[in-house]
Structures are given as structure tokens and as C-alpha cells.
Image (tube, coloured by chain):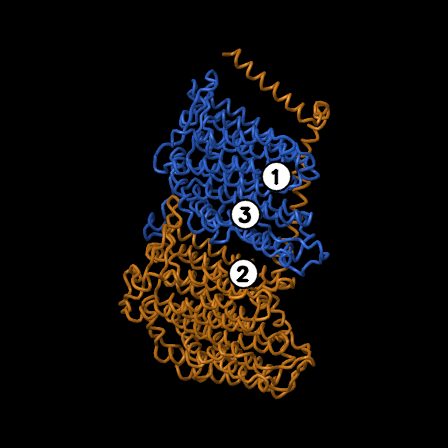
Amino acid sequence: MTSLPLLTLMMVVPVLGAVVVAALPTGSVRLARPVALGASLVTLVLAVLAWVAFDAGSGRMFQLTETHSWIPQFGVSYALGVDGIALALIVMAAILTPVCILAAWNDEVVDTPGRFKRYFALMLVLEAFMVGVFAATDVFLFYVFFEAMLIPVYFLIGLYGGPQRQYAAVKFLLFSLAGGLVMLVSVIAVYFAGPGGENGFLVEQLVGNVNGSTGALRWMFVGFFIAFAVKAPMWPVHTWLPDAATEARPATAVLLVGVLDKVGTYGMIRFCLQLFPEASQWATPVVLTLAVISVVYGALLAIGQTDMMRLIAFTSISHFGFIVLGIFAMTSVGGAGANLYMINHGFSTAALFLIAGFLVTRHGSKRIPDYGGWQRVTPVLAGTFLVAGLSSLALPGLSTFVSEFLVLQGTFMRYKVAAVIAALGIVLAALYILLMYQRVMTGPKPAFPEDAVPADLSHRERWVVAPIIAAFVVLGFYPKPVLDVLNPAVRTTMEIVGVTDPSPAAEASGSAK
Amino acid sequence: MHSLITAEGVPAAADASGAASAAWLLVALPLLGAAILLLGGRRTNRFGPALATGMSWASFAFGVVVLVQLLGASAEERAHHLTLWSWIPAGSFDLDLGLLVDPLSVAFVMLITFVGSLIHVYSLGYMEHDPDKRRFFAYLNLFVAAMLLLVLSDSYLLLFVGWEGVGLASYLLIGFWNWNPAYATAANKAFIVNRVGDLGLSLAIMTMFISFGGVSYATVNEGVANAGQGTLVAIGLLLLVGACGKSAQFPLQSWLGDAMAGPTPVSALIHAATMVTAGVYLVVRSHVIYDAAPDAALAVALVGAVTLLFGAVVGCAKDDIKKALAASTMSQIGYMMLAAGLGPVGYAFAIFHLLTHGFFKAGMFLGAGSVMHGMNDQVNMRRFGGLSGAMKITWATFGLGYLAIIGLPPFSGFWSKDEIIHSAFTGEGWRPWVLGGAALVGAGITAFYMSRLFFMTFHGEKRWTEDVHPHESPKIMTIPMMVLAVGSAFLGLALGPTHAIEHWLEPVVGEHPEADAVIGTLPLMGITLLLVVGGIYLAWRSYWREDVPEVAPRASVLTRAARVDLYQDAVNEGLFMRPGTHLTRSLVFADARGVDGAAGGMAALVGGFSSRLRRLQTGYARSYALTMLTGVVAVLGALWVIQ
């Protein structure tokens, strides 16, 4: 089974699906949805196979590897492979894509048959790129996927989004391109600072082999970091996200915020930490400061929003702050927490965006003040919305709690002040979630004309929500399968950076004060 | 002297055997009930409430089996440890999910499942006509499960899961009738204030991990001996912050009064008998830490003393029967916290009072619910009066609870509260006088406000509004009240003079030390009773003999302050809410104008350039595709040339 090029197949299948969808004759355009769903489900099966084939205890940096020479003159290879971190993110992407396709089933993009089928085709293309970007173990290949992802997202927002879609799409593109260009300089510099040769861009070749003056390495680190901070997104380069998230269709917003933005935090681990250990430690104080600001700032801004989608986008800025905090705390606990957070945040945000999307479809408004009392109208929708919200505020028992606690605990082991300030986020999260729930769902039952009472969640919508909520609960009480996959990769990262966990105070100092 | 205690001060719990090895069932049964009712939807409407009630009783029955097993074992062998599965293996943080069945947790299991099940039964009557009855019972079951998890967990982190779980159940039930915006706000307030406490608890857990390398009770208790005083005090104070939130202790008390928005059975179960006492449980469970950090323990005692007076004063001024009872709850939990903060002389009595209070306060809340049931859901005691004739069972059961809480012998409250007052007067220096004095004065005020409540409701002139026809509640409601009344009357007698409670808890909190109070036992008891009788007399004079005005008179400055909970909401609003609102508003403005504006400014620069580029943007996808194709061909061509 391991001989199958699973990772490549996970890109080929959605691309083929996209081609088929795009090539459907006008008469049978309705087939676009089942074909797209089928392609994404096949990809999910492949992802499960990859999960099974992956051996957490193997000790190798990457598994399921495929390496082919691509442009040997520049040292560029087509090299794929995953460690636990990448694998978990790919599986998450493979789960969320069919969920999003199902959620987008009735999105009103049907004004022409062509537009309709391209909508689903673009999602599949995006899935292929998402797999590629996490699976690339060649820095240049990663860069190619990193930039290529922008194309489907740009069109998904710019063609299918809300009234301000052009503005949002261009803003998204400009921010990302600017970050990407800075990164390109670093990508090229890394090649010259590394061992070079035909495989000069392979991560495995580069780890521990990027040499240069301290200053040069730090500049390279900064180049990567800026691109990833924009993508993540961190304060103060976050402003593209709320616009993009509110203008995009909910399914697009999920793929964008839930999966694609993880490239930022993933990249910080894979490239910033693993290629530039010294520079990472040098930058830690600044990064931690930005992360803590993101946590608090995102949460405060979320409290002040009146647009549901913008609110959810700001909660994500806060949550990305937590992830970055966990990554740069450089402890095994914080690292495991940050990586688990990436997965959990994907599901949590997906639930919030999609269920809020269901609500918007029913009422036609994203403005929170336009709602009130909807629990009496759509009780199941309200219940699932509350569960999604509770997941966002990291209620113990749900998966997000485990990761948020681990991030804070891991940070607290080394940086107490940062952890304590970030911990304020747990109070602020209760505010932004519960205030939104109160304004949308509670209060007197709204009056609707007899024949226009909004329906509760349909069967399709329940199927969208059910797997996500199941993931919340299962991973809340039994996160071990995921943590077992993540732990070795976190350990490897720490070994590369050259840090170890601080030992417990009472053991270290004995009975001394 | 500490014969049962190992060198670290804690008995090692053996691997669970017998019924205790299936202790997870205690949690699983009500959890299953909640899951069936919530996921089953309308299909379970018909049998849901009965099923939930059955699940709660099943959990109680199994609890009794476990209790019998423990009673049959010798004192040293009453702690059972049960590891269920590896929960969070994350680098150096590695925690199993496990349960601890010991005398302390089993005492709570009994209280939670017995009172909880009675309240399920009562709710069958009380909520009979509510259209969302199924959801109500699902939440009740969820609460019971979370509360049992809280007391049965073997680590602070799993306790935290139960801790926030009961908070969630509390939130859902306070806001059960959330179409009333005030109730929805009350629910939010409870959750958010509790989150402030939970922040403290989280930080306590994090400090434990970096100090002891683990967060299970066993690891923490073992590590205390090697930890610095500063660390221990910090942990103790952070735990206290958590306890203050959950147990509505000063300064995080503001949510409890508003929490009375929930249906009355909820107030009885969650906001009187069980959940709000979780803070006391936390302190007693962490006794090894507090024993080693006397400063933190003193803080606990002081918080308890302040709160018991705060609640008592507020209780004197409330005209809403439920809010008066809520203030009383706060005050009584203040007594428990005070006792817990006294150390080994107080732990057992904190739990003792917690148990007796669970019975008499739950009984009185159910009585209040019964009164509301007969009075068209009115709560204003100024429009009650003379109900003793119309609702004899309610009057009698409530009366027993009333006699218990004011501490008249031989009823339950007398035994537990008198022990706390006595213990508070032990020690040296100023402490016995301040802490004991607060407890003593509190007893007098308690007698006054509870008598006021009892007389205004059941005695004196009838001040009913015209549309009410008070009647006794159905059997399904009065029988649980009667059972609780029996407990209010005799539980203290069973556990107090026999010293059963001290012996039962000895394996957990250590041998109960004999300590002399600064005042002799009998004189102290005499003074207490004198104050109690004085309180009753004052209340009798103003609220039974005299006519109670139907509209509250203007009254003194203190009364007016007490009516608005000693300005707690005004303080919170001025200190946190209004500045917070300003902060978020100005940040939202600044984000749009400042942070995004800077980015937008750059965009404007680029815009000039891009307006020329715009001519290339025809808007036709095919022309884009053509451009891309050209690009791809060019790149491939270049590569071919290089090769």
C-alpha cells in the first residue's frame, strides 16, 4: 500500500474531478455537485489510507515520500512527504472539503450553468493545492503551491462572493502576493545558503545545513515569517481576513480560514523553526508579543463586530495568535498544543461559518442586530450554533479546550507573562460568543408571515454539521490518536531548534524556595 | 496522630475493585440520558422526562452500592483509583483520564444523586406544562453528569471539565426561558463571571504543572512537600479565585442573584444544593496545598467571612423570595468557605454544613417553587402573607428547612453551623475574634432574614393580588419536599453528635484535631442561641405582628444599598463593562481607520498604477486563461532552452 503515491493521488483525484465538473455539458450541469462530492470523498478515502500507512514511531522525518527530479539546474525537485503535522492538516483538509461541498450544495450561484459548475470545480482545484502545499518537502515546490493556491481562492471570492467581493478579493490577493514576494527572496537565498546541487531545495537536505552569517540567516527568517504572518494572519497584517471572510461564501471562508491559513502557522514550523533555529530564538520575543496582541486584539475586535462573518473572522485572528504562541513557546507541550489547535480550529471555524451561513441563507442578512429569538424558530440550528460557539470558546470536554489549554500550559512553562495575558482570551472568548448567541438566538420570537417561517436545519445541513460536532466531542475526550501522530514531529522540531522543556520547579530546586 | 496518612499527607488510593471499578457508570448514566434526549429530538418527548429521572435514580442506586462497598472496607481502604484511558499525551504533559472514589467524592455523589433525583421528580410536576420539558430534563441530566465528573475526577484538569460542564448546564438552565431578554442576560452574566473564576483555576492548574510536573491530585499532593511557600500561596489563591466564581463568593458573587431567572427546581439543585458548593469541594480537595500555605488558607477564611455577612445583609432587604434565598445561599456557602479556610479543624464541618445545607436549602427552594406554583409565578413576598393555611404541606416542609437554617436545635443546621462557629473561634491572635465574630453575627442576621422571609410568606395578613387562588401543589411536587424536610430535620442529628462525618472524612482530610475555642463551648452556644432568638423576635415584630406594606418603604441607607446588592452591579459596570465597551468600540474604529487605513493608503498608491493595468482586465475568463497559458508556455520554453 505504501508503494502507492498516495499524496500525488490526493492531488490528481480532485484535479480530475475538477476537469470532469468543468467539462460537463450544459444539459447535465446538475451533476457538478455529486461529481465534486464524489471526487472529494475519494480523496478522503486516500487520506484515510495515508493515515493508516503512516507510522508514528518510524523515526524518519518524512514518510509517504515521493521524489522526482524536476528542474535539477535549480535544485528543484517534485518532492512530497509528510510528517505528523502535515499529515494531520492534510486529513483535516480532506474531511473539510466534502463537508464544504455539501454545505455549498444550494448556494445561489446558478445564474449561468458555467458559473455553477466552475464554483465546484474551483473548490476541488483548491483542495489539490492544499494537499500539495502541506505535502511539499521541497522549498521551491512549496512556494509554487503557496502562490498557486491564491488563484482558486481569488476566483472563489471575486466571482462568487458578496457585494464587495471585488474589493475583498483584490485585497486578499495583494496582501498574499506581497507576502509571497518577500518569501521568494528568502526561498532563493536559502538555496544559495544551503548545500546546493540537484536536490538543493529539499527540506531534508536543508535542515541543519543552511549556513551564512547570523544577519543573513535572520533576514531569510524574516522573509519567510512575514509571508506566514500575513497568511496566518497576525496583527497588524490581519486586515484582509475580515473582508475576505465576510465577502466569501461560507464554504469558501471555511476553506480559506480553516485550512488555507494554516499554511502560515505550518510554514512557521516547517521553515522558520526548522531552517533557522538561531533566528527563531532571536525573534521569539517579538513574535510572542505579536501573538499575544493578536489573541487579545482579535478577541476585543470580535466583541465589537455587528457582522457575523466578520466576528468569526476576528475570533480566528485571536485563535491564530494562540497557535503562534504555542509554536514559539518552544516546549513539547506548547508545540503539541499548537498543532492540535490547527486541526481543532479548522473544525471549529468550519462549524461557525457554515452554521452562520445556514442562518444567513434563511434571513438574508449577516448583521447580528437583524436577528433575535431565532432559537424559538429554528431550535436545532440554534443548538448546533451554540455547540460551535462553545467549541470556539474552548469549553472543556470539547476538542478545542485540549489544544488551548496545552498552548497556554506550554507557554506558561517558559513565558509566564505572555501566557497570563493570553489567558485573558478565555474570558473574552466567552464574551464574543455568548453575546453573539444572545443577540441572534434569544429574546422574543420574531414574527414571520404564516407562509414564510424559516425552516429548521434540513437533512443535508445536518449531515454537514454532524461530523464536525462528532469531531469536537471525540477529540475532546480522546485526542490521543491525533496527539500520537503530532508528538514525534514536535519532538523533531525541538531537537532541530535545540531546545528542551524546562523541568518542574519543585523537582529542580528541591525544597529550596 | 495522623495514623491513616502517608508521609506526604495523603493516603495512596488503591486500584479500584468491586463496584468502585465501574464508578464511571455514575457519570455515564445521566450523560446517556442527556444524549438520548438531546439527539433524539421530538421523538423522545413522550418518555424523555421519565427516562431522565430514571437515569438520575439509577446513578443514585449505583452510588449506594459504592457507598456500601466503602462502608464495608476499613478506613484505610476506602480510596479507589480508576484509570480509564490515556487522555492527553502531549510531550512532557501526559495525563490519564481517571476517577477517584473516596469518602469525600462519595459523600458528594450521595448528595448530588439523591437531591438531584428528588428534584427530577419534583420537576415532572413543576414543568409539566412547559413545551420544552424534554430539553429541560436533558439539561438536568447533563448537569448531574457534569457535577459527578467534577467530584469523581482524579486530576485538576478533569475536575475542570466537570467544573465548566456544570457551568454550561447552569448557563443553559438560567437561560431556559431566554425569550425574556433579562433571563438571557442573566445566563450570560453567570457564564462570564464564572469564566473570570475559571481563569484563576486554569492558572492554578498551569502553575501546578510547572511546579510539580503533573496535575493529578496524587502528583500534586506528593509535590507539595518540595514546593516553595510562594508557589503554594500562589496556587492556593488562584484556586480560591476559581472557587469564588463557582461558589458566588465575594468579589465574584454578582451572578447568583440574577441566576434565579432559571426555573425554580434549577435554583434548588444547581444554585443552592450542589453546583455552587463546588468551590468548597475544591478547597477541601486541595487541603494538602492549603495546609502547607496558611496564608492562602487565611484568605479563604476571610473571603468566607466577608461573603457570609454580605449575603446575610443582602438577604435582609430582598422582597423577591428567590433572590432572598439566593442571598442566603451565598451567605451559607460563606460559612462553608470560612470553615474550609480554618484548616483541619474546619474541613469536616465545611462538608457537613454543605450536606445539611444541600437538604434544607433545596427543600426551601422547592417550597418557594410550590408557593410560586400556587401564586401565578409571583415572587414578591410583599404580596404573599398568610399562606400557611392555603398550603399546609408547603408550609410545614418549608418550616422545617427554616428551623434548620437558623440553627435551632435539634434540627440539621444547628449541628453543622454551630460546629463552624465553634471552630471559627479557635486559633490565636485576632483571628478567632474576627472570624468567629463574623460567624456569630451572621447567625443572628440569618435568623432575622429567614424569619422575615418565612413570616412574610406564610404568616401575617394576606396581601395577595386579586387574581390569585393559592392551592397546594400536587403530590409529585410535595413528596420530594417532604423527603428533603425529613433530611433538614434529622440529617444533622445523624451525622453531628455521632461525629460520623469527621470519621468518614478522616482518610481524606486527616484526623480531626480537638481545639479549644477562645470562648467556652456552652457559653458560645448560649450566645449563638440568644442572637438567633433575637433575630427571630425582630423579624416577628416587623413582619408578623405589624402589617407589611405592599410597596417597599424608602427605608435607611443600608437597606437601600442592600436592595441593590450593595451596589455590586454598579461597581462591575463602572469598573469593567463601561470601560470595556469603550475599548472595543474605539478599537473597532481604530482598526478600520488606522491599521487597515495604513494598508489602504498603500493600496491607493498601487491603485494609480493599477488603473492602467485595468485595461488588460477585460473580465473574460477566457482571456485570463489565455494569458495564463501564454505564461506557462513561456516558462516551459525558457526551461527547455536552459536545459
- Colour blue belongs to chain: A
Q: Which residue is mark 1?
A: A241
Q: Quadrant of residue B290?
A: bottom left
Query: Chain B shown in which color?
Result: orange
Q: Residue at x 59, y 70 (%)?
A: B129
Return the x and y of residue B602 as percentages of the image width and height: 67, 31
Number of the front mark, 2 or 3: 2
Indicate the secondary structure of the residue bearing disc 1: helix
- The CA distance from mark 2 to mark 3 is 19 Å
Q: Which residue is mark 2?
A: B43
Query: Which residue is at the front of the view, A257 or B220?
Result: A257
The N terminus of chain B sits in image quarter: bottom left
Q: Which residue is mark 3?
A: A463
Number of the front mark, 3 or 1: 3
Return the x and y of residue A231 as percentages of the image width and height: 56, 35
Number of the front mark, 2 or 1: 2
Instruction: Kindly identify which chain the residue marked by label 2 belongs to.
Output: B
For residue B295, say whether it is visible: no
Marks 3, 1 in one chain? yes
